[in-house]
Amino acid sequence: MSPALRYINIAIGVVTVLSGAVQTVAPAFILRLVHAETSATATQSFAIVGFFMVLFGGLLIQSLVGASPRGPAAPGGSAAGEPLRPSPRAAAPLSGGSSTAFLPSVFWCGLQKVGASVAVFVGIYHGVFGGLAAAVASFDGLSAILILGYWWAVRRARTIP
């Protein structure tokens, strides 16, 4: 498996955090973009969803950035930029000196993307969202495939690319 998939998923996490942050602070703006109602209830609910997007995106980023072939790192370097060293409390590696303890987090982030994609497509079907929302749902669906594909590949190989 290519390490590029890990970096693509980190980018998905960044996009999720940024779009969730915008949705949290400007829900009515985003709702207007997808041709949805902007009542107080709708904007408040949409802002809450955005907040959880920030959390799941951040979890995905932290899980994947913290995963390295050398295992998790612990602070121990000097202020002068001495490199981090492996944590003595790190999870026991499965093989090749790498820990896959981050995998449950990646799995749940993938499921969040599945749920988001399905929910937006259902909203389009029921006329809650306009056609532009299909791009959002498609991005979330593709993200789910990439995230869960990475989860599956690392789980099977038991090493981090």
Image (cartoon, helix red, strand yellow):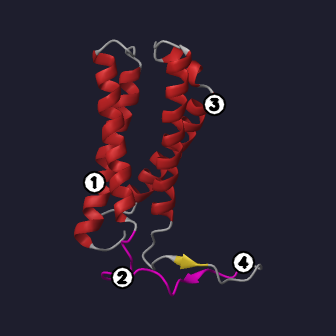
Q: Which amino acid does label 3 sit on?
A: Val
- The residue lying at 25 percent from left, 71 percent from top is 157
- The residue lying at 33 percent from left, 29 percent from top is 119
Q: Say if 23 sits above or below 31 in the image.
A: below
- Which residue of the protein is positioned furthest toward the left in this rendering? 156
Element assignment for label 1: helix
Element assignment for label 4: loop
| Residue indicated by mark 3 | 25
Q: Position of residue 100 (x, y in %)?
A: 36, 72
Between marks 3 and 4, how big is the CA–CA gap?
Answer: 36 Å
Residue 120 can be seen in this image: yes
Residue 149 image label: 1
* Badge 1 vs badge 2, beta-carbon distance below 8 Å: no
| Residue indicated by mark 4 | 81
Between marks 1 and 4, how big is the CA–CA gap?
Answer: 35 Å
Label total for image: 4
- Frontmost of labels 1 and 2 is 2
Quarter of the figure with residue 150: bottom left
- Which residue of the protein is positioned furthest toward the bottom in this rendering? 88
